[in-house]
Amino acid sequence: MTPTAKSRRKRQTTKEAKLERLRRLAKRWGAADVKVIGPDTVFTGTWVRLKCQYGCGGWGGCLTCPPHSPTPETTRKLLDEYSTILLVHLGQWGSVREIIPKLERAAFLDGFYKAFGIAAGPCRLCDDCDLESCVHPREARPSMEASGIDVYKTARTNSFPIEVCRTRECEQNYYGLVLVE
């Protein structure tokens, strides 16, 4: 084996070990499951953002939601700058907003300097969002939906459960992403 091939193999093993460590951390923090996926299995669409505008009371209410969040076009470009994404599955909306920034920070500290998290739903860190400047930049992350990510297609493509909830008693599934390189 050439020194270059050996070095590449060692880096790959190290990356895999770090990703496994991040998976374990997320599960310890409350994730039901975490999968390592590629950007080609995360789907975006203009219609998703429109569902936020016409169907969610959070539109324009915080910096993590439209019209302040990334557009579907920007999100697609962002996703394509990464080779590896952690798709995090949770059963509770609140824990997505807690786990994703923590997992992003852990990834950054593990050497994934480009780590970036995308959560779910509107941010609830403040009663009233300061739309000029976020007072919680370490915790606040845009939501997948607000950024144009088709969460249903993404979850289903990656063999995770998700269905339309027809009642409040319906089992809910929430998702978040941490982009790593």
Image: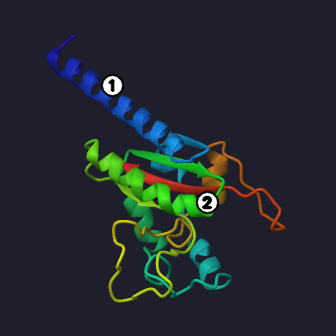
Residue 114 numbered tag: none
Looking at the image, which residue sits at the far top? Answer: 1
The image shows residue 2 at horizontal and vertical percentages of: 17, 14
| Residue drawn at (48%, 36%) of the image | 24
Q: Is residue 162 left or right of residue 138?
A: right
Task: Please give the residue where the numbered disc 1 appears in the rendered image.
Answer: 13
Q: State which quadrant residue 135 falls in.
A: bottom left
Q: Tell me the crowding category of disc 1: few under 14, some 14 to 19, or many 20 or more residues within 10 angstroms, Cα based.
A: few
What crowding class fits label 2: few (fewer than 14 Cα within 10 Å), some (14-19), or many (20 or more)? many
Residue 124: image x %, image y %? 52, 76
Mark 2 residue type: Val
Above or below, 164 against 49 in this view is above
Number of the label disc, if any, that sits on residue 151: 2
Q: Position of residue 147 (x, y in %)?
A: 49, 70
Identify the secondary structure beneath mark 1. Answer: helix
CA separation in Å, label 2 and label 1: 30 Å
* Circle 1: residue type: Thr
Residue at 43 percent across and 33 percent down: it is 20
